[in-house]
Each structure stands twice: as C-alpha cells, then as structure tokens.
C-alpha cells in the first residue's frame, strides 16, 4: 500500500525460506520492515539491521519477549535499538504488562548474581515468593 516491501516470518515458514528472509532483511538496503511472530522470531536469529522492536502481542513469560528483543541486540549492532510495547489502558494487555513487570522484578531480585541477593527483598516479598496459594494446598 505504501510501496514498501514487508517481510513476514511465522512458525510455518520453511527453513529455506526463513534463511532467505533473514538474509534479505540483513542486507544494507534490504526491506525496512520484518514482521515476526514472537515464538518463531524468538530464537536463533541475528537481526542487527533492526533498530526498532515492536511487541504487539505480549507473552506471559518475560523471558520470551526478552529473547525476541535480543535478536536486534547482537554483536555487530551499530545502531541504538528502541523497544516499543503497545498496551491499551483498562484492557487485559495492561494487566499482562503489570504481571510481566512483577515477574521480571521478582526474577531480578532472586536470580541476579551479586551481594545481598535475598536481602534486596522485603520480608513480605520473600514470603509471597515462596508461599503456596490456597488452591495449591486445598484438601480434596
């Protein structure tokens, strides 16, 4: 519609075509837009020609989004990369975004190596991290 070629990679894309799409995008004056489904584009790609990453379809696991974003943050990347996430106020996406942020903060506080690893969490946060919900311990 706008005279710009758009590449599209999804889970059903055959391996040979996948490689052709990646190579075409990675050329210096290749197509400026490459749409990838989150799971298909999340692993094993180097997309250093990308300098904007847009997340339209959020994933429950922050690591999945991080892996997809990291396709642009590779050795050889010479441009600053901006990450954009589209979230509508008052929708399920907003709740998912909040949940993803909470998961990421919890993982950073528990998993990140360094001094005072656990002491960065409050007693309430520690308790909440390891407490089972009522559903998990209900008697049936």
Image (cartoon, grey):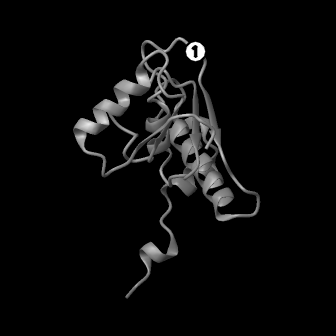
Taking depth in this image into account, of 17 and 61 the one nearest to the observer is: 17
Tell me the residue at 40%/85% (across/down).
139
Q: Is residue 46 visible?
A: no
Label 1 sits on a secondary structure element that is loop
Instruction: Between residue 95 and residue 86, name the one nearer to us.
Output: 86
Q: Is residue 71 above or below residue 90?
A: above
Say left or right for 54 vs 94: left
Is 70 left, or right, of 95 in this rendering?
left
Task: Using a 10 Å C-alpha cutoff, classify the residue at mark 1 as few (fewer than 14 neighbours), some (14 to 19) or many (20 or more).
Answer: few
Residue beneath disc 1 = 79
Q: Residue furthest bottom?
A: 140
Q: State the image coordinates of residue 138 (x, y, percent, origin top left).
A: 44, 81
Residue at (49% x, 21% y) in the render: 49
The residue lying at 52 percent from left, 25 percent from top is 50
- 110 shown above or below 74: below
Res 4 → quadrant: top right
| Residue 10 in view (yes/no) | yes
Residue at 30% across, 37% down: 18
Q: Is residue 91 depicted above or below 69 in this figure?
A: below
Q: In the rendering, at what x and y percent does residue 71 appear?
A: 44, 29
């Amino acid at each position: 519609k706008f005279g710009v070629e758009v590449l599209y990679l999804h889970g059903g894309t055959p391996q040979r075509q996948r490689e052709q799409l990646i190579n075409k995008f990675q050329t210096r004056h290749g197509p400026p837009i490459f749409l990838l489904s989150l799971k298909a584009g999340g692993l094993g790609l180097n997309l250093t020609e990308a300098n904007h990453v847009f997340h339209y379809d959020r994933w429950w696991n922050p690591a999945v989004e991080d892996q997809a974003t990291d396709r642009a943050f590779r050795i050889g990347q010479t441009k600053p990369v901006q990450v954009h996430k589209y979230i509508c106020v008052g929708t399920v996406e907003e709740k998912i975004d909040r949940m993803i942020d909470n998961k990421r903060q919890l993982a950073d506080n528990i998993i990140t190596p360094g001094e005072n690893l656990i002491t960065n969490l409050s007693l309430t946060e520690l308790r909440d991290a390891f407490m089972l919900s009522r559903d998990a311990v209900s008697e049936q």
